[in-house]
Amino acid sequence: MPRRRNELLANELSLLKSKVTDEEAWKEFERNCNLRNHRPDTKLFYKNKLSATKTTLSEMNINKEVVELTQKDIENMILFLKGKIKIVSINSRIRGLKTLFNYLYKSKMVVPNPMRNIKQLRDRSYC
């Protein structure tokens, strides 16, 4: 087996340098959902989580596209939401964003994956 080279090809570098908008990312993600035969409600779930994230970012005065978010931005968003909405709703957003970013990372549209180390919150309201 040949040794793996530790450099990127020109087309791989161009992918890293080109910026993806939320709309382009959503179109690719939706296309993937269609290929995997997801139900319309599932696609609507992901679209709603993306939209809710955009709304939260504007409330926090963060002028970034969702695909430009860093792990720190997402952590700040979770802390911001903790006082506003229930833990179950925050976890729902985390699940939706995690699925979206995992797809974008696998298709090399975002590097690195900001949701990689984000875990769902524990719901201690039942105690």
Image (cartoon, rainbow, N blue to C red):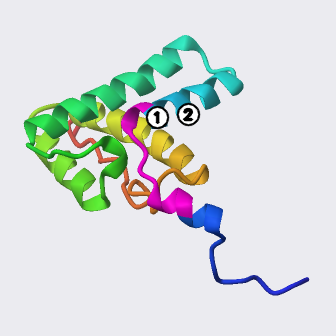
Quadrant where the C terminus sits is top left
Tell me if 89 is positioned left or right of 99 in this view.
Answer: left
Residue 67 position in % (x across, y down): 37, 46
Q: Residue furthest top?
A: 40
Q: CA distance from mark 2 to mark 1?
A: 6 Å
- In percent of the image, x 9 and y 42: which residue is there? 60
Neighbour class for label 1 at 10 Å: few (<14), some, many (≥20)?
A: few
Q: Which mark is residue 106?
A: none
Residue 4 position in % (x across, y down): 76, 82
As drawn, 65 above or below 52: below
Q: Which mark is residue 24?
A: 1
Residue 96 position in % (x across, y down): 42, 35
Q: What secondary structure characterizes most of the magenta part?
A: helix
- In percent of the image, x 50 and y 21: which residue is there? 43
In magenta, the rendered stretch is 14-23
Neighbour class for label 2 at 10 Å: few (<14), some, many (≥20)?
A: some
Amino acid type at mark 2: Glu
- 80 or 30: nearer the viewer: 30
Q: How many marks?
A: 2
The reply to whether the magenta stretch includes residue 13 is no
- In percent of the image, x 23 and y 43: which residue is there? 124
Residue assigned mark 2: 28
Q: Residue furthest bottom?
A: 3
As drawn, 112 above or below 52: below
> Is there CB contact under 8 Å for labels 2 and 1?
yes
Tell me if 70 is positioned left or right of 101 in this view.
Answer: left
Amino acid type at mark 1: Glu
Which quadrant of the figure has residue 98?
A: top left
Tell me if 121 is positioned left or right of 42 in this view.
Answer: left
- 2 or 9: nearer the viewer: 9
